[in-house]
Image (spheres, coloured by chain):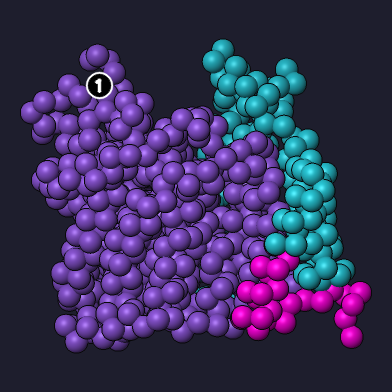
Amino acid sequence: MFDSVFTAASYLADGMNLLFLLLGVVVGVVFGIIPGLGGATAIALLLPLTFGMQAEQAITLMGGVMGAVTIGGSITAILLNTPGTAPNAATCFDGYPLTRKGKAGVAIGAAVTASSVGGVIGALILIMLLPVAKSIILFFGPPAYFMLALLGLTALTAASSNLLRGLIGACLGLFIGFVGYDDLGGVTRYTGGIDYLWDGLSIVPVLIGLFAIAEMLKLYVDGGTIAKSGDMDSVGVSGTLEGIKSAFRHFKVILSGSAIGSVIGTVPGVGGTVASFLSYSFTLQTSKNKEEFGKGDVRGVIAPEASNNAKDGGALIPTLAFGIPGSAEMALFLGVLVLHGMDPGPMLLLEREFTIFVLILALLAATVASGIIVLLTARYLIKVTYIDTSILIPSVIVISLVGAYALHNSIGDVFAAAFFGVLGYLMHRFDYPRITLVIALVLGGLMERNYFQTSLMYRGDWSKAFGDTPFVILLGLVVVALLMPMISKALKRKTGQKA
Amino acid sequence: MMVRLLNSGLIVAAVMVLCAISVLIAAYSYQGISGTFPQLVGWIFLGLALLELTVQVVAVMRPPKERQAAVEDEMAGVSVVKELKAVGWLGGLLLALYLVGFLISTPLYVFAFLRFSGRLSLPMCAAVAAGATAFVFVVFVQLLEYKLFPGVLLMG
């Protein structure tokens, strides 16, 4: 293992690879700062640029984005009270009050330090847990794999805003995945006589459409500048060194936040937002003097920031070990792996240790590099959010469509990206979660293959699958995931009645 | 009454039911194992879509005051004209791409969008259009060496 770590480190230190890492970091910071865009859009937009790269270079670029995006998002949360990405929402509670007290620099210094240290801890936890994941996956047969894919799907759906619509979105995603030639049965399905669809829909134009183009349509309809509140001219960033020191003074908060982030990250669908809120409330509950929380307590910035960057390490475990992405960002990252000829799942972990360590080290380096970049340029970066969206929209749409075309030199992919852009916008408009569609699309093939193999194994008698322990455990977890929204609703109602 | 009939959730749920029925019928046309899994998913899809439709019908039949207000707010908050314009701009770009390819339609589209939709000054529109085209040319054509689609009118 250590050989792989050293080889990966020397690979990353190479000039060209370092450049890709820095490019990813810069793009990640900028997309993190712009509210509503985030890591998924950044990865969707950068994906086509990786076609000609080596797999490890593409992974380095994406590692840079993933490691940097939440650090960028903390800047708008602190300075404008507008979280750049959803996991930064909890940072607003104390970050913005600190800005109003004239301590924006302290908040940014603390946030960046906590986020960077949290990211490093998350990556180290990932390194420690990977060998454990390796041994676990060897116990998994087709029935357990089918159930695991179903768990990934249901856990994400249950975490979405509307369970029923999330499940409908998942069904749509599965059917989109069925389009094209079926290797198992040797027939074409759902092509509607269109030749272009014979090879199935490529994941890249679908993702570009659902994330990059749909977001631009949303921005067009919303209009104006991206940041709707705050005053750019009144933003002053000083005292960052004091912020860095205060983060280290509250190192216990960083440790607890990172631990919460790493654990929550491993659960598909729960993600960074829950991790950061949980970390915030844990710090609040366990602190002796709670009076300052919500009024500008630096611990209220450190706790969520440490957890939301640490969660990336945890989230990579199901993505790499089982091919089950836990978030939109991870689904897109899975798309990058597939595009570069890698098959996420047990074999990836067993056969491509070097590639995995390139990713982990890229994540690690990105969290530190993005921290430094943000500390040096925060006051200038914030101006990005005041750009008129009409400048951003046409350029991003054109680049997205060129990217969609570049994969197979197919104009059909351009039309597919545009179609999924409109579909993505409509899903947002009518409150149907896009993420469940994407996850279903990614997991559809895995589910169908393992469903078929299980049916063959048990000659169609699925009751025999109950003799398979991992299958039963995972089935139990699927049921819990589906019941969770109802249980939490009932609990909330009960708490409300008591109050 | 019009607001009730135009409840977007109801329309979308009805579209989902139709979608589920279509894919389920198609699933039964595939022989052997190719149809098994789509049939299973199709029935689940239909069940869920019908459930959503029921939820929406119940909501429309007996709208509480707050729901009525929410529906009206939703209608007022989103400009359908603006949405159609957004799709129109995208459609226009697709048509231009198909006819004259990426390298001609990129500056035309960016310039036209900024001028007529963004209402920016001529020099600004020209600068951003030139910047976007230069980015596409340098990154995709020069660095990554892709042959961008020339458009059906300029092919050959």
Seen from the viewer's position, the closer of residues A364 and A379 is: A379
* Residue A317 shows up from this direction: yes
The question of residue B76 being in magenta is answered with: no
Q: Residue at x 88, y 75 (%)?
A: B152
> Left or right: where does residue A396 sit relative to residue B51?
right
Q: Is residue A252 left or right of residue A25?
A: left
**A450 horizontally vs B50: left or right:** left
B25 in relation to A89, above or below = below
Q: Check the picture and name the quadrant holding the N terminus of chain A.
A: bottom left
Secondary structure at numbered mark 1: helix
Q: Which residues are magenta?
A: B132-156
Disc 1 crowd rating (10 Å Cα; few below 14, some 14-19, many 20+) is: few
Q: Which chain is cyan?
A: B
Does residue A164 appear to the left or right of A428 in the view shown?
A: left
> Looking at the rendering, which quadrant does residue A295 occupy?
top left
In the figure, A326 relative to A164: above or below?
below
Q: Residue B141 colored magenta?
A: yes
Q: Position of residue A262 (x, y in %)?
A: 22, 55
Which quarter of the figure is the C terminus of chain A placed in?
top left
Name which residue lies at 61% across and 80% down. Answer: B143
Image location (x, y in percent) of residue A323: 37, 70
In the rendered picture, chain A carries what hue?
Answer: purple
Could you say where residue A339 lies in the image, as x and y percent from the top left? 50, 77
Q: Position of residue A373 (x, y in %)?
A: 38, 57
**Residue located beneath label 1 in the image:** A495
Q: Between residue B81 and residue B3, name the one nearer to us.
A: B81
